[in-house]
Amino acid sequence: MKSFQAEFDFSLKAICTRMLERHRDTIRTQKPHVAVAKLMPIIQTTLTLANRKGFHSMSLRDLATESGLSMGALYTYFDTKDTLLMMILGEVSSAVSEALGSPPEGFADNPAERLHWLLETHIYLTEVMQPWFVFAYMEAKAFPKEGREKATKSELLTEKMIADALADGVESGLFSVGDVEFTASLIKPLLQDWYVKRSKYRRRGISPEQYVQAVTEFVETAIRCQSEPLPRKRHRANHRSETAAAAAS
């Protein structure tokens, strides 16, 4: 988990900074540090209110009151609630692409390690961005068409990455999977359970690292060819260090 956090910055401030860069045509505040400072309570309050009462039950006046900003200040950052919604969903989709889109060097030819890395990275990503992913998951049914399409596209992207690793493992004789796309769709809820049902795991004292280990062992046991044990996994930090050392030598 610490290795993931050292590699990626998905803090609220970092995400709002990227949000400002992507929505310069919408956000009218000129000074970046002022814009980010105001975006942070807007987004934090939106996620909190959405979790408490639902995004579509939240009014902009509710958002203004809870965030401590005026209605006029809110309209400096977005023109409608749907715009705010798409800004949030856009950051969730971008985070998935950034974190999962570039496996470590060498994993392209090792489907077992690539699959383990995908599961691990997804769980750690949703750990540090838990309110964002809960928002996208819980509010999806009420999204306008554009929002539903963006949320669906992001989910299918994750499933495709998993399916590609499964397919490569089947081709190399490591995995025994009849339908890789269907199997990927069965694995996805295991990843979603971590951020949607957080209280269940908190009560049991389960850490992110323990959940990674449990999910990867469960998946790998289910898909491995019985005659071919999977290679022993390396921790993400160890692999990054080995790759860097090899490049320097």
Image (cartoon, rainbow, N blue to C red):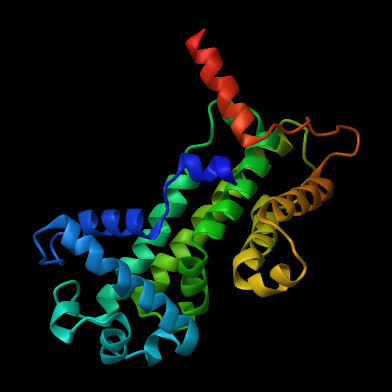
- Give how far across and how far down residue 44 sits, in percent: 38, 72
| In the foreground, 54 or 209 | 209
Q: Is residue 66 left or right of residue 186?
A: left
Report the number of numbered marks.
0
Task: Pick out the residue farthest to the front.
Answer: 68
Q: Quadrant of residue 25?
A: bottom left
User: Compared to 47, does 165 lie above or below?
Assistant: above
Task: Pick out the residue farthest to the right.
Answer: 227
Q: Quadrant of residue 230?
A: top right
- Give how far across and how far down residue 225 sits, in percent: 85, 39
* Residue sitting at x 11%, y 65%: 29
Q: Is residue 231 left or right of residue 42?
A: right
* Residue sitting at x 64%, y 49%: 119
* Residue sitting at x 66%, y 55%: 208
- Give how far across and how far down residue 58 sits, in percent: 36, 89
User: Compared to 166, does 15 lie above or below?
Assistant: below
Q: Is residue 133 left or right of residue 242?
A: left
Task: Pick out the residue farthest to the top.
Answer: 249
Q: Is residue 160 left or right of residue 170?
A: left
* Residue sitting at x 28%, y 88%: 65
| In the foreground, 82 or 42 | 42
- Give how far across and how far down residue 34 sits, in percent: 17, 62
Q: Quadrant of residue 88?
A: bottom left
